[in-house]
Image (cartoon, helix red, strand yellow):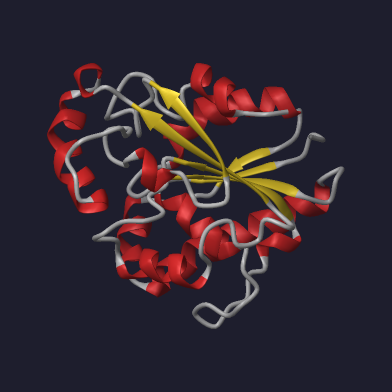
Amino acid sequence: MAAQPIVILGGFLITPEAYEPMRRWLAAQVQQPVVVVPASRMDWLFTVSGWGWARLLDRTVALLQQQAALSPTGKVTLIGHSSGGVMLRLLLADQPFQGRCYDGKALADRLVMLGSPHTALKATPLRQWVDRRYPGACFAEQVHYLSVAGDLPLADGSATARRLAPSSYRNISGSEAGPGDGLVPVASACLHGSECLVLPGVAHGGAFGARWYGTPEVVAQWWRT
């Protein structure tokens, strides 16, 4: 895969500094700009509404357009962590959302989704809508989709993972049993029709375990050049 810029959209309530080790590692590999969409915790709280989604997607597409104009391939790689991966599935579409047409697939040819809850019995209304409207790897003819899931034994996870995993897994899959990353079950993170990579011992985020999707040694496992 040719080196090209990367735009990262993080997960719910996670601010950009958490992704800095990942950003630096990727920048050293591709020798191209790697940028994280600016998002505060308040920005994420607004995503209970379509308006809040649009605010973050507006910022994302602005960065996407900027980086595509500088890219040696004319394309950009998108990376979404957790809820960010679901939102980027919507960004690829060329149909209106909140009065906007993003059509990210015209500028991005790769989407990497890290621990994203694509399907859930008790998904938020907006996540359910994305999965109904743009099911699976909907634009696979134009975009390569890579789903990355963690398989974290809860005995190896943090106290937060051990506390939250049972209820989170139950709400998503109907069962408290894993495998999963301490928040999202593997089956939910593996988007239908995408390439799926399951990483043993990897947690959803830094609060869930020492090794998560953004830890440089873990990034080296899922990043493909």
Q: In this rendering, would 132 be left or right of 154?
A: right
Q: Quadrant of residue 128?
A: bottom left
Q: Which percent across, then down, holds residue 118?
A: 41, 54
Q: Which residue is rendered at x = 36% and y = 64% of the image?
A: 47
Location of residue 140 with respect to 16 vertically, above or below: below
Q: Which residue is rendered at x = 58% and y = 21% of the image?
A: 220
- Name the foreground residue: 146 vs 85: 146
Q: Which percent across, then down, holds residue 72?
A: 87, 43
Q: In this rendering, would 106 be left or right of 22?
A: right
Q: In this rendering, would 165 be left or right of 90?
A: left
Location of residue 79 with respect to 211 vertically, above or below: below
Work out which quarter of the rendered image holds the N terminus and state it. Answer: top right
Location of residue 93 with respect to 200 vertically, above or below: below
Q: Which residue is rendered at x = 48% and y = 61% of the image?
A: 56
Q: Which percent across, then down, holds residue 180?
A: 31, 34
Q: Which residue is rendered at x = 57% and y = 51% of the image?
A: 193
Work out which quarter of the rendered image holds the C terminus and state it. Answer: top right
Location of residue 164 with respect to 131 vertically, above or below: above
Residue at the outermost right position: 72
Count of marks placed on residues: 0
Residue at the outermost bottom position: 99
